[in-house]
Image: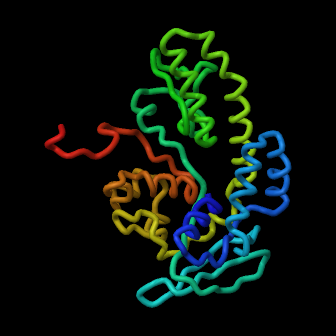
Amino acid sequence: MLLAVAEYLRSKDANVVTIAEQTSASKINKFGVGLWRMPSKLVQAIALRAKLFGVPYLTDCWATFASGTGKLESVTLTRKGKTWSIACDVLACGFHLVPNIELASLLNCTIHDGFVAVDEFQRTSCENVFCAGEPTAIGGVESSLVEGKIAGFAASGQLEEARKYFAERDKTRDFGERLNRTFALRDELKMLAGESTIVCRCEDVTFGRLAEFTNFREAKLQTRCGMGSCQGRICGAATAVLFDWKVGSVRPPIFPVKLENL
């Protein structure tokens, strides 16, 4: 996502001074070689990189600190044991993607390793409930679309039509799996948060405050972490990484709605 966001910003005349990628150059090179099996992805990658010509792309590198008086003025980067600061007024950070499995959880569908478990026809463990796209695996729009086709044909009883897309789905899933392996977050990133780092943005709850508790429920009752407008969608994933906490049960409505709509 770093390259895509950087290219978009540059297309809007932003001066992108650096792209800092936390994964290693060896992993990225290995991933790039594998793109020969998917020519469309290779062409897409080359075109994207060409649009960012001249922008430093640093691997094994990540932001550790943001500084400024009243506004962002500089960012401190670390790379292979060395740290330095660069002047900038905007910092965009991405720490991977997480699936939205709330609806599936509410329906009591089986969840495995954080994703909705499905069979070859995209059927969940609940009768007449199908799932496609990011909740089943982070694989990109192509994977989501082909899974949606399979689920649609299977839900309407056209199993043979659904089978025609199995090979295409397997191909997109393989790409997604390699993508996730390549850009998996390194353990050092778990050490970025300091005492004053805000983890729950809705309720302004800091890392230091949360460190006093042993689970998400305790922290929620004492600090209101996860009780803000996002209902734990941001801090829930953060605390899962930082403290290995489980957010807990999902309650309706899935998204906050106005009383007049109800």
Q: What is the x, y in percent for residue 43?
A: 75, 50
Residue at horizontal 71 percent and vertical 54 percent from the top: 183
Camera-nearest residue between 206 and 31 = 31
37 relative to 244 in the view: left or right: right
Q: Where is residue 117 in the image (x, y as percent from the top left)?
A: 58, 28
- Residue toward you, 160 or 65: 160
- The residue lying furthest to the bottom in this view is 69
Q: In this view, does 48 lie above or below 170?
A: below
Quadrant where the N terminus sits is bottom right
Left or right of 228 on screen, residue 102: right
Picture layout, residue 29 above or below residue 34? below
Q: Residue at the spot x=46%, y=15% of the render?
A: 127
In the image, 70 versus 218, the foreground residue is: 70
Quadrant position of the C terminus in the picture? top left
Q: Nearer the viewer, residue 123 or 155?
A: 155
Q: Which residue lies furthest to the left in this view?
A: 260
From the top left corner, tell me how far across and down residue 149 is, in percent.
56, 24
Examine the image and state in which quarter residue 235 appears. bottom left
- Residue positioned 55% across, 39% down in the render: 134
Image-quadrant location for residue 251: top left
Q: Position of residue 159 (x, y in %)?
A: 59, 10
Image quadrant of residue 111? top right
**Direction from residue 251 to residue 53 in the image, left or right:** right
Q: Image check: 97 left or right of 30? A: left
192 relative to 148, above or below: below
